[in-house]
Image: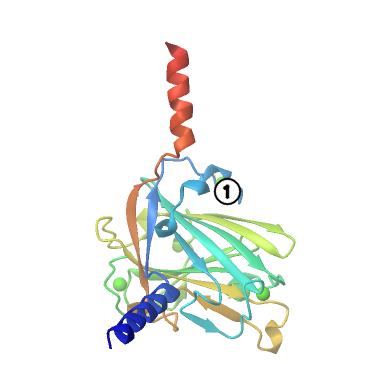
Amino acid sequence: MKHLLSILSILFCLIVQTAGAETVVAAKVSDDSIQIDAVLDDWKLRLFVDENKILLNPKTASAIGGTVKDADDCSVTIYAAYDSDYLYLAVEATDDITYAGQGGATIWENDGMEIWIDGGNNAGEFPGEEDNYQLVTDSNGAKQGYRNGHNLDELVDGVENASERDGTNYKLEVKIPLQHIRQLDLANGIGFNITIVDADAARDAGGWSRLFWQGDLDVDTASWGDLLFGEPLAVEAHDKLAATWGYLKLF
Ligand SMILES: [Ca+2]
Ligand SMILES: [Ca+2]
Ligand SMILES: [Ca+2]
């Protein structure tokens, strides 16, 4: 019986780990230290720990809308950071086929990222509550904001985003004014979700697919996770050594 309980508890832990965290903690960075150019060397990504990022692939996804067969088909790492004025997200995406032929109001059908924000972190209706909105940043570097049944310029004015392709893979970088997030309380965090679109070339044949970080229905705010506003990134050991060496050389 004791052995059975041990095995069951191990299995439970494995299931919890497989399901992935429901919280991502944005790292505090210096104001204006991140430039939106789809080049991520300004992020110091090596300092990001597991809680600062979302690993999204067919195994970690809460749900798959459509078909994403394996990590080569679509898998992404999403990094979160913030400063006094902006929330930043960076995406490194692996994709086997790029589809990004849509323009105008249908850019959400392109390979790219959909960001779901519940500013008051109180769930609520979507569409309905004014603090709930969706921001699309596609792999062309286009953007779109949606709230209460409307695409709104006010949701994308002031948002900067960039995309860079490397073959069929791509990188995204985006910054969102914190002022856009209604009912924001940094101490409370925001309700948050990410869906990654994997359109591929089979879009017209029903191949439009998505990986869900949380839940399985994009507008179900109650199923979203949390984004918390955390501490600055830890300084890496060799950065400390370099600083110490500089100090020694001074004296
Ligand atoms: Ca950059
Ligand atoms: Ca794909
Ligand atoms: Ca809300």
The answer to whether residue 122 is seen in the rendering is yes
Horizontal and vertical percent position of residue 131:
33, 68
The answer to whether residue 214 is seen in the rendering is no
Classify 138 as above or below 4. above
* Residue name at image x 42 percent, y 19 percent: 247
* Residue name at image x 58 percent, y 58 percent: 172
Q: Is residue 171 left or right of residue 10?
A: right
Amino acid on which disc 1 is placed: Leu
Residue at the disc numbered 1: 40
* Residue name at image x 68 percent, y 82 percent: 203
Image quarter where the C terminus lies is: top left
Query: Does the beta carbon at disc 1 come under 8 Å from ligand 1?
Result: yes
Question: Based on the displayed image, in which of its 4 quarters is residue 237 positioned?
Answer: top left
Q: Is residue 69 left or right of residue 242?
A: right
Question: Based on the displayed image, in which of its 4 quarters is residue 70 positioned?
Answer: bottom right
Residue furthest top in the image: 251
